[in-house]
């Protein structure tokens, strides 16, 4: 498998930690994020290539795939949390935006890049889903629906390309420390009229470990999946969730 990777939404959080881990392991990496992000500076710091992309825009996704070239590893990390509202109050435009970034963008990147992996006889796709992909998630319908859909894409594509030497897996993180979960917790507190501390305790209580997942734990799982030790792992949904229930 060619040791060249594309990681989306990688100017911060899980994505940036993953880029750093891959670079430390000797991979060439394309770091991609919104054009207005700090991606260019982060890429320079990591020794990665910088290709800006708004995952809501199919033309920019096509340009990203072309610039990335023949990658051996695609990490679909891009995602929007979306509003915290019941289905009856969810704006259709918010639904469409979350589905575009969380599900359609991974589909388009797989459609563009996986055939090149098949031609090379090896490759790996890692889709960053969520524990929301296996629960009912009140007030977060577009996010949950997109992540459930991402599991369907993962399992289906794994069956389609497994015989060609290409593996496709999903990682289901629990609550990962960082600005994204902080904003989700704040929205949960506001929507339910509870103190921020109570909202945070609600999220931590669902993880048996009682702590936030560190981004490095997700990056480490990606490195494991890219190793020879994981050569028979495909079509799987790996929970890195602290025993979430």
Image (cartoon, rainbow, N blue to C red):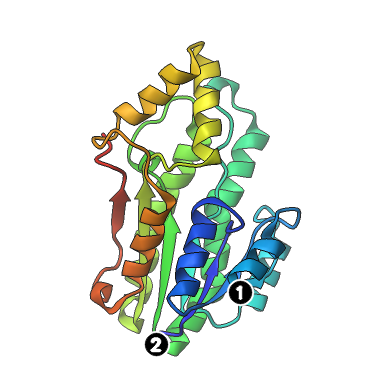
Report the side of 116 relative to 35 (left or right). Answer: left
Q: Position of residue 231 (x, y in %)?
A: 27, 76
Considering only vertical position in the picture, is 139 above or below 80?
A: above
Report the side of 225 relative to 177 (left or right). Answer: left
In this view, the residue farthest toward the bottom is: 120
How far apart in space, not on screen, are marks 2 and 1 (Cα)? 27 Å
Task: Report the label total.
Answer: 2
Residue 121 disc label:
2
Query: Which badge, 2 or 1, comes first in the chain's sequence?
Result: 1
Q: Position of residue 245 (x, y in %)?
A: 26, 34
Considering only vertical position in the picture, is 134 above or below 228?
A: above
Q: Nearer the viewer, mark 2 or mark 1?
A: 1
Closest to the observer, 67 or 97: 67
In this view, the residue farthest toward the front is: 45
Identify which residue is drawn at 65% across, 58% down: 33
Identify which residue is drawn at 54% across, 40% down: 180
Identify which residue is drawn at 62% across, 57% down: 11
Closest to the observer, 109 or 50: 50
Can you see residue 147? yes
Can you see residue 87? no
Closest to the observer, 156 or 190: 190
Residue 167 disc label:
none
| Residue assigned mark 1 | 47
Which element is circle 2 on? loop
Q: Position of residue 153 (x, y in %)?
A: 42, 58
Q: Position of residue 156 (x, y in %)?
A: 37, 62
Which element is circle 1 on? loop
Q: Residues within 10 Å of mark 2 (few under 14, many from 20)?
A: some
């Amino acid at each position: 498998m060619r040791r060249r990777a594309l990681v989306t939404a990688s100017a911060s959080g899980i994505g940036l930690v993953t880029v750093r881990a891959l670079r430390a392991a000797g991979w060439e990496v394309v770091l991609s994020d919104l054009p207005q992000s700090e991606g260019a500076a982060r890429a320079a710091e990591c020794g990665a290539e910088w290709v800006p992309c708004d995952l809501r825009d199919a033309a920019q996704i096509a340009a990203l795939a072309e610039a990335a070239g023949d990658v051996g590893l695609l990490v679909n990390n891009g995602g929007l949390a979306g509003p915290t509202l019941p289905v009856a109050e969810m704006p259709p435009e918010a639904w469409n935006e979350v589905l575009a970034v969380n599900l359609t963008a991974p589909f388009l990147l797989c459609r563009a890049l996986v055939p090149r992996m098949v031609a090379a006889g090896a490759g790996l796709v890692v889709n960053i889903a969520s524990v929301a992909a296996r629960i009912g998630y009140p007030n977060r319908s577009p996010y949950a629906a997109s992540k459930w859909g991402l599991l369907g894409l993962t399992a289906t594509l794994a069956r389609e390309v497994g015989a060609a030497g290409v593996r496709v897996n999903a990682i289901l993180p629990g609550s990962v420390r960082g600005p994204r979960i902080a904003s989700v917790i704040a929205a949960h507190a506001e929507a339910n009229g509870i103190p921020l501390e109570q909202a945070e305790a609600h999220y931590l209580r669902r993880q048996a470990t009682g702590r936030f997942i560190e981004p490095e734990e997700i990056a480490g799982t990606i490195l494991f999946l890219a190793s020879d030790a994981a050569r028979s792992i495909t079509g799987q949904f790996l929970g890195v969730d602290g025993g979430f229930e």
